[in-house]
Image (tube, grey):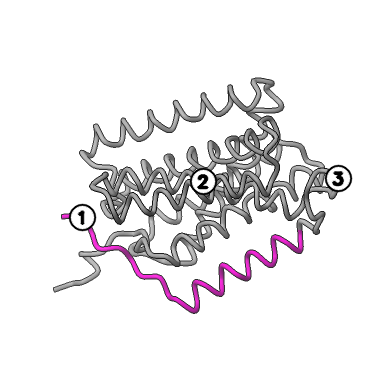
Amino acid sequence: MNTQNNLAKVPEVTFVFWVVKILATTLGETGGDAVSMSLNLGYLLSTGIFAIIFLVAVWAQVNAKKFHPLLYWFTIIATTTVGTTLADFTTRSIGIGYPGGSTLLMLLLLASLFIWHRTEGTIAVNSVSLPRVEVFYWITIMLSQTLGTALGDWCADSLEFGYLGSAIIFGSLLIGVALAYFFTGLSHTGLFWVAFILTRPLGAVVGDFLDKPLDHGGLELSRYWASTALLLAILACIFLFKPRAASKLH
């Protein structure tokens, strides 16, 4: 039996998966800000740059014959960086604000999940093995990352909870999702996507806490050094824990 035929092209959802996901979303915030703000390229041009990287990464991921941890997490990071600048462009440059941007992105995300489910009959991540399903998967992830950025900014800025307060809020919500996963009969697939969305605003506000000015409640660390440290932490997790591909849904 060819065991590769029984594996999806996404990693097993383990504790390390969530650690790397939070690190990647934090890197997306510091990396996105480094290009759009520190390099002063603006949200629209930065979104265009990251969108090209995202599309190339997805193309490589879809055409890969099996799960490759480095390629997978590079693509996740690409979704977080494009999500950061796209959310900032949507909520700030277009002028619809955090509530309007979050609502629009939520509707797009729900539409993506609905179409995916109607087309394939499931939105379970361990069904991701065929190119068509992978396209749904990556579109949904990109939208969830963009929505998460807008939610994080809304909570930290408009609702004035600040970066640490927002991190506590989103961290507590994630703990609640974990408890629901282990102690209730709620859909594990649904809880996965809720957790996936919530890790993005958590990473966003942690990233902002690291690199925003002191008078805005941040630590004012270098975006380049913070991004480098986060990238090294991600690589360490990948090489130390060697994530495996998830078993296919049958």
Front residue (pair 103, 85): 103
Front residue (pair 191, 140): 191
- What residue appears at the point 79 percent right and 55 percent down from the top-left corner? 219
> Residue pushed farthest right?
215
- What residue appears at the point 31 percent right and 31 percent down from the top-left corner? 115
Is 173 one of the magenta-colored residues? no
Q: Which residue is mark 3?
A: 215
Classify the position of the N terminus by image quarter: bottom left
Residue 212 position in % (x across, y down): 78, 48
**Magenta-colored span:** 224-250
Packing grade of label 3 (10 A; few <14, some 14-19, many >=20) is few
* Chain-order first, disc 2 or disc 1: 2
Disc 1 marks a residue whose amino acid type is: Leu
> Which mark identifies residue 249?
1
Quarter assignment of residue 154: top right
Classify the position of the C terminus by image quarter: bottom left
How far apart are the alpha carbons under marks 3 and 2? 37 Å
Disc 2 marks a residue whose amino acid type is: Leu
* Chain-order first, disc 3 or disc 2: 2
The chief SS type of the magenta part is helix
Q: In front: mark 1 or mark 3?
A: 3
Q: Which residue is mark 2?
A: 55
